[in-house]
Amino acid sequence: MKSGSEDTAASALKTLPFPENEEESTLFKTVGWVSAGLGAVALGLFIGRELRLRYKFNRRTPYDFYSHSGDEQGVDFGIGI
């Protein structure tokens, strides 16, 4: 004799939208792996950027405290030539 919980579990499994054939299952697996890979790449880029910014911040020189340090403009900029 079956219990009531076994009947409800079996009926629930019949109504869930599982892939019917192997092609749908392969498609879902491929989409899942691609999205996981893109997520890992995005996370790596974000962490790499943060580490690079921290490295650059810790390696500052006294000249970096000026407002336009690092701006690369011509020598004759602003002298009226």
Image: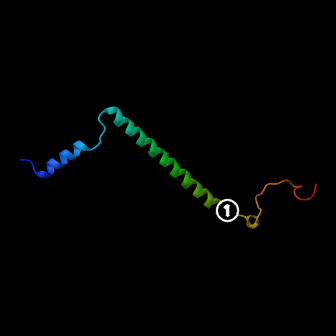
Q: Residue sitting at 44 percent across and 46 percent down?
A: 36
As drawn, is 75 to the left or to the right of 23?
A: right
Tell me: residue 21, above or below residue 33.
above
Residue in the image at 61% along x and 56% along y: 52
Tell me the quarter of the image containing the C terminus.
Answer: bottom right
Q: Position of residue 54 (x, y in %)?
A: 61, 61
The way the protein has been coloured in the rendering is rainbow
Picture coordinates of residue 34 (x, y %)?
Answer: 45, 41
Is residue 36 rendered to the left or right of residue 71? left
**Quarter where residue 21 is shown:** top left
Kind of element beneath mark 1: loop
Residue under numbered circle 1: 59
- Given residues 75 and 9, the one toward you in this image is 9
Q: Which of the two residues, 60 or 8, is positioned nearer the viewer here?
A: 8
Q: Taking 66 as reference, is 70 above or below it?
A: above
Report x, y in % for residue 45. Answer: 55, 51
Q: Residue furthest right?
A: 81
Is residue 19 rendered to the left or right of residue 36? left
55 vs 34, left or right, is right
Q: Amino acid at mark 1?
A: Arg
Q: How many marks?
A: 1
Q: Residues within 10 Å of mark 1 (few under 14, many from 20)?
A: few
